Amino acid sequence: MINLIQDVLESDERSDLRQFASQLRASDKRYLLRNDILAAFSEYCASHKKPEHFFQHSQLGQLVYYTQEIILDSESLYLLIRPKIASQEVYRVLEDLTVESVTVQELLDLRDRFVNHYHPTEGDVLELDFQPFYDYSPTIRDPKNIGKGVRFLNRYLSSKLFQDPRQWLESLYTFLRVHQFQGTQLLINGRIQNQQQLSDQVKRALQFVSDRPDDESFAEFRFKLQEMGFEAGWGNTASRVRDTLEILDELLDSPNDEGLEKFISRIPMIFRIVLVSIHGWFGQEGVLGRPDTGGQVVYVLDQARSLEKQLQEDIKLAGLEGLGVQPKVIILSRLIQNSDGTRCNERLEKVHGTDNAWILRVPFREFNPNVTQNWISRFEIWPYLETYAIDAEKELLAEFQGRPDLIVGNYTDGNLVAFLLARKLQVTQCIVAHALEKSKYLFSNLYWQELEDKYHFSLQFTADLIAMNATNFVISSTYQEIVGTPDSVGQYESYKCFTMPDLYHVVNGIELFSPKFNVVPPGVNENVYFPYTRTEDRVPSAIERLEEMLFTQEDPAHIFGKLDDPTKRPLFSMARLDRIKNMTGLAEIFGKSKELQERCNLILVAGKLRVEESDDNEEKDEIVKLYRIIDEYNLHGKIRWLGVRLPKGDSGEIYRVIADHRGIFVQPALFEAFGLTILESMITGLPTLATQFGGPLEIIQNKVNGFLINPTDHEGTAEKILDFVSKCDQNPNYWEEISNKGMERVYTTYTWKIHTTRLLSLARIYGFWNYTSKENREDMLRYIETLFYLIYKPRAKQILEEHMHR
Ligand code: UDP
Ligand code: LCN
């Protein structure tokens, strides 16, 4: 990249760089992020009457394109350049245009200086560096393979293992010996005492099963196999047992990574799973749309159902059904005594539509019952997690009558508890971020001290670092969640290098090229969210009721606004009322466009209608703002705002009713980590326009099966909506075309079946490698524990003290 700067300096554009720099110096902004940089450069091009191509195609334009941040101090200009995904270089450009490279340490000091928190005379600030722990583990080379970790890991480790055939056979043999289910030995028994016997007996068993009818049940020949040293777990029929043994035989003779992956994916080693999801109101009814309670709850419940189903299928195929083996999935959440009409005060609740999936709620210890018996915001939850993990461990051991086989954490708090549990129980850990707050709130790390009262980011980011480094594997919903796009930084990437002034400097917070990262997107509940065209599955009375609720019903307690003309095309949106969801932004977009108001009504399902009913600061602010916008743009008669909590069935039907009216779904978030509502609207056949910031960029293929919008550009977004509406008015088939393509996109790419098959396969393979390669992570885990005890805990204690005085 230095070449690119050098090229600018050595070309005619040298004076442009000088003038652009002095334009930047003349303005009062001292810290520019990418949008500011592009805006400033566009202004420069306009004021200097540059030809059109200069903005993008000049050498300076290229340099600007790759620049993520510019920081100015009295003498120089610092450019933070991201030449490609997951890499960063920093340069200092002096007034005379000499260029120097800047180290990470200098950059972090500079940022501290910028916020007046640089105190070199008081000594250095703590530096956190995880890189040494990754130095001896494999890393992916090509950024396009980031997120395909397991394939890489399997190839890498198997090639190492296969180099030493003796060790390979020994590892495989010992691995096969350890499998049990509640005391019953699986796969091989004591009759096979070493690897040589394993190899011989596999050939004998193969011959034996090959002579039997394909569909003969395992129970029929179970005892014969047992005599040869084989227990249950190889298959439910003669042909399935033969297939599995053949894969093993091949692996023993000529090992290869694909065969190994196939074999491990068949091993019955996962029966009991914990999904940790702590904050919010974790329930099955009447909770969605409350602050902190959204997609994560939907995701975890659907995942639990789907995991149980997949495990049941796997157990059946492995021939374990007859042995009474039953999988169990526990969602571990918190018990909230003052449960506000929800079931969150119940210790155990069965997950609807399952045989053995449960929500297990464990209360926080009663440090101050006035706090701990109530809902606690996700930003305040930190002091309760360690003791919670201790209590939860006991309850889990009792519920499972043993240890779980896999622990999956969700969001920072759940991931921290998953870490504590996995460490204690020595179980494979997986984490799911859902949303990393660091990239959601601009400058959240730089100004953490000012924000600490409200957000406690010092705990959140420390907990994030702990969980993402400690975990065996990560599943992310999109690629860009890990490393962003060519022009935007990924959510995990934002933890690579940052400063928490006066607390610590992170010089290397996470190895983005580690094979622990795997992209496994969620699906959508197909029983609830299905195409509007499936009329046979729709309930006419529900349609009628929701029609009324959406368009005409008068119910001031829950619905605001009366439509002048309910027949106009509905623009629909549904989200929690927090700032980032930007429902107020959508109202403003609508308010600013007279034409949109003439052609459409705006219908929002969001939060509550009254400030007094909310106990969340952001929700309160958004309620006030929404009323202000409605008045300011006089949207009365054109908007309906429903402050309702929909039962599950209704939340599917509501999209379909909007689709019946040839409506549109708009998701205007300022940033959306993934965006389940987008899958929901697309699968029901509702054409969808969604934010280009975050996950929707990967879900929607722009103009093919939906549209991407920049919600900060109000006029541009209104134009895109109007453009779609006009095309549909001219040609009604256009609405249907986008509707059909949206449905197709979800059915082919975002199903829970795809998700869980993949997740279970990952869990088995990481479990296998953990066991066989005895990957030595103890040093990193000790470092992580030190962070937990020396940084996290004392800070958490401070919050606890504040809470004790409430
Ligand atoms: N939801 C709902 N009622 C509301 C708001 C949201 O049922 O008033 C549901 C919505 O259908 C979706 C989930 O909550 O299933 C929101 O998930 P998403 O991933 O879109 O956003 P999150 O709230 O997790 O940030
Ligand atoms: C949290 C979010 O903010 C959403 O973007 C996701 O869709 C949801 O969690 C489920 O992962």
Image: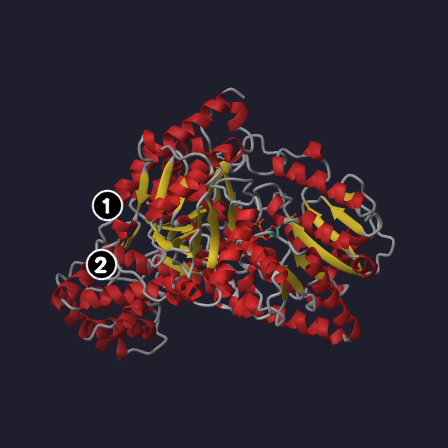
Quadrant where the C terminus sits is top right
Provide the secondary structure element on which disc 1 rests.
Answer: helix
Residue at 76% across / 53% down in the picture?
Answer: 592
Residue nearest the viewer, comparing 204 with 103 = 103
Q: CA distance from mark 2 to mark 1?
A: 21 Å
Residue 178, percent from left and from top = 23, 55
Residue 518, percent from left and from top = 40, 60
Crowd tier of the residue under label 1, counting other residues whose Cα lies within 10 Å: few below 14, some 14–19, many 20 or above: few
Q: Which mark is residue 778?
A: 1
Crowd tier of the residue under label 2, counting other residues whose Cα lies within 10 Å: few below 14, some 14–19, many 20 or above: few
Residue 133 placement, left or right of 307: left
Residue at 46% across / 52% down in the picture?
Answer: 491
Of the residues shown, which amino acid type is indicated by label 1?
Glu
In the image, farthest residue toward the right: 564
Task: Please say if 242 is above or below 796.
Answer: below
Residue 245, percent from left and from top = 26, 72
Residue nearest the viewer, comparing 208 with 198 = 198
Of the residues shown, which amino acid type is indicated by label 2?
Phe
Residue 615, by quadrant, is top right
Ranked by sequence position, the earlier of labels 2 and 1 is: 2
